[in-house]
Image (spheres, rainbow, N blue to C red):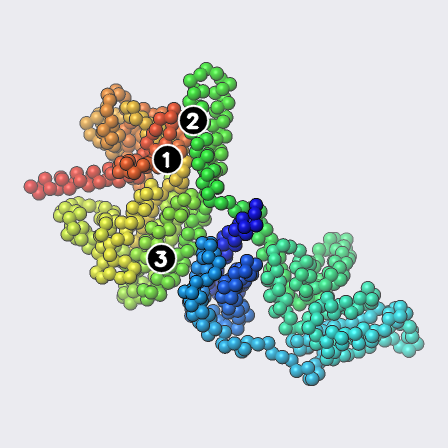
Amino acid sequence: MSFEDEMKAALDTFVVESRELLQDMEDGLLGLEHDPNPADSIGAIFRAAHTIKGSSGLFGLDHIVHFTHVVESVLDMLRNDEIPVSSELIAVLLPCRDHISTLVDGIAAGTLQETAAQHELGEALHAQLRAFLNGEGQTQVQVVNQEEPQTAHASGGGAMDSGNWYLSLRFGRDCLRNGMDPLSFIRYLSTLGDVVNLMTVTDAIPTIDKMDAETCYLGFEVVLKSSASKEAIENVFEFVREDSTIRIVPPNSKIDEYIDIINNLPDDTELIGEILIKSGVLTKHELEECLRLQAQRHQAADGKTSDAPIGEILVKQEMLQQPILNAALHKQQQVKDTKAREKQNIRVDAERLDKLIDLVGELVIAGAGANLRANKTDDVALLEATSEVMRLVEEVRDSALQLRMVPIGTTFSRFQRVVRDVSIELGKDIILEISGGDTEVDKSVVDKIGDPLMHLVRNSMDHGIEPAALRAARGKPAQGTLRLNAYHESGSIVIEVSDDGGGLNRDKILAKAIERGLVLPGANLSDKEIYALIFEAGFSTADQVSNLSGRGVGMDVVKRNVTSLRGTIEIDSEMGVGATMRIRMPLTLAIIDGFLVSVGESSFVIPLDNVIECLELPRQATEHDYMDLRDEVLPFIRLRQLYDIKGSVPRRQNVVVVGYGDNKVGLVVDRLLGEFQTVIKPLGKLFQHLQGIGGSTILGSGEVALILSVSSLTQRYSKLEQRRLQMSTVSNVR
């Protein structure tokens, strides 16, 4: 691979990861206002911005670095409680997130520099951010007056200035015998900074009769003002640290720095000791000493095992402050979670996955052909071999399709931003509730369902949920609720968009439909049939047109898009209570389990998930289109008549009972041919007008079979019944 190819691949990875971080950033921002403990969310948002800035710097994307730096500064103040969480701040940070997303999209499109318009927008957003920074220079770190002496206590913790190091030194008893002068080490400390205070500890000096002139009994408490690292200060005592007890406590002002360093460490180790060493808060010597203490405490006095955590030992030995340990433990958990996700997930290019599904589809067709030819022979071994191959092909098919299944919750979460922005635009207080986000559906369905859901959500907010004053008059809470829900049902995915608004006005819809000639006066229609009229092109009952809706050009698009996915949409509504838009779609658009039937010389495939049972057509049902099914009236559709199939009618016909949602209907066919793995092939434009046909497939013999759309057929039956009722009503009037 050439350098250019490697660079392009790296940029592609940067774009993908940045988009994921930006989505996390948006989700975090949207949840801040209602989060009682926002610290974790703020930290995650900050890390997302910081990671994007750092990655951009690696590729020389200075315009992203420049813009994100200011965003990061505001988030840092938010993280340190220097500014509060507010709606005003979130209203600024969200467009900043969007601007970063636009810049990243530009990188994806091959534009490595920002445009003039992007630069102008970035500067405008920077101006808004600086308002929260309270002016440059006001957040500078306070400088300590070096001339003022600082007090320290020999007890170990001490009251010390936030800018000073604290050293507790206890030299070994043989220090003097080994030719070492304790004071020389203290004098050397002054080369690293200013010794602000020095206190001699004499607690260990014995009485005069027990004193040894060559034994060191002194200890020292030192307050040092220095910019040196902890490791550099520890190295001063290199020659005496084996026999001495040396405790080095960093300045209080350093604690936040250490925590920040820990939070921004790469996710390459989950060992607490290594995290602390990499951050500079702990030295290798201190870690080794702590490990020795841990080993000593491992075996308790009573013989039982005692596993003292290394962090606990570090705090007790005053090598580490508790806030720094907490940050390190949090980082350790993050690394573990990241590695767990990396072990479980692998990023695969969508085109490669689609290619795999296509190959699996061809394998299914080829396997069906081989099985068909094997069945025509009397070779038992061949039949067993082909049967085993078909079993394995079915497993491969199921596994391949599972690779394309993704949770719909990612799509749902994107509407948090939509609901927030639209509710502000409309002047309404609306909250979004999401359930069933872990429901999995084919990626191709997820990619295409976003636009219909957008129309439904905006329509519910604009026309469904009432203004606060009207809700109060109706005894409702001022805050409206919009719900997104998803679940599996009979081999389909059901997506519901519901609200607690005013519901649909049945009478108003019917009157408008009669006015436009869509419905005959006096027609006896059910509530669902009346509600379905809003999906007619150009149909609208809105009294006034808004920026969001009211022109009658949205709901028909929704139905057309859902229908193109072999799905249906229906409405449940109750005046004054609310409305629910319910979308039903197949789980996958690639390969399904089907039930093969034939009428004359034509073959049809019925989705197996829709098949309830099969039975023989009663002889008394030859003159009408319904039958008695266990004291239940079952209407049926004769496929021979529906599709004008020529040929003689067999003496015995069969009925395949199918169901879709709450509807149940029978399909009259000539022969039942059994289960069939169906690779869905789209119909050409020439055949797209066919009623009740959802696609085609290739049989093992090479012949083409049409795939029946159960949802479309049940709807067709409903319309036929509606026309019959209308004609009956007109006849009665005459």
Is 299 on the left-hand or right-hand side of 592? right
Mark 2 or 1 closer to N-term? 2
Name the spot of residue 606 as percent of width and height, x first. 34, 32
Which-is-in-front pick, marks 3 and 1? Answer: 1
Label 3 and label 1: CA atoms lie apart by 37 Å
Q: Amino acid at mark 1?
A: Lys
Is 654 on the left-hand or right-hand side of 699? left
Q: Write down the residue under mark 2.
A: 368
The answer to whether residue 501 is above or below residue 361 is below
Observer able to see residue 249: no
Indicate the secondary structure of the residue bearing disc 1: loop
Binning the other alpha carbons within 10 Å of mark 2 as few (below 14), some (14 to 19) or many (20 upward) gives many
Is 198 on the left-hand or right-hand side of 690? right
Name the spot of residue 107 as percent of width and height, x first. 47, 56
Is 216 on the left-hand or right-hand side of 195? right
Residue drawn at x 55%, y 76% as measured from the top left: 139
Label 2 and label 1: CA atoms lie apart by 16 Å
Name the spot of residue 286 as percent of width and height, x first. 74, 63
Question: Toward the viewer: 209 or 665?
Answer: 665
Q: Quadrant of the N terminus?
A: top right
User: Where on the picture, by quarter, is residue 647?
Assistant: top left
Mark 3 or 1 closer to N-term? 3
Binning the other alpha carbons within 10 Å of mark 1 as few (below 14), some (14 to 19) or many (20 upward) gives some
Q: Amino acid at mark 2?
A: Ala
Name the spot of residue 193 as percent of width and height, x first. 72, 76
Label 3 and label 2: CA atoms lie apart by 47 Å
Q: Amino acid at mark 3?
A: Leu
Q: Write down the residue under mark 1.
A: 681
Indicate the secondary structure of the residue bearing disc 2: helix
Q: Are marks 3 and 2 in contact (CB under 8 Å)?
A: no
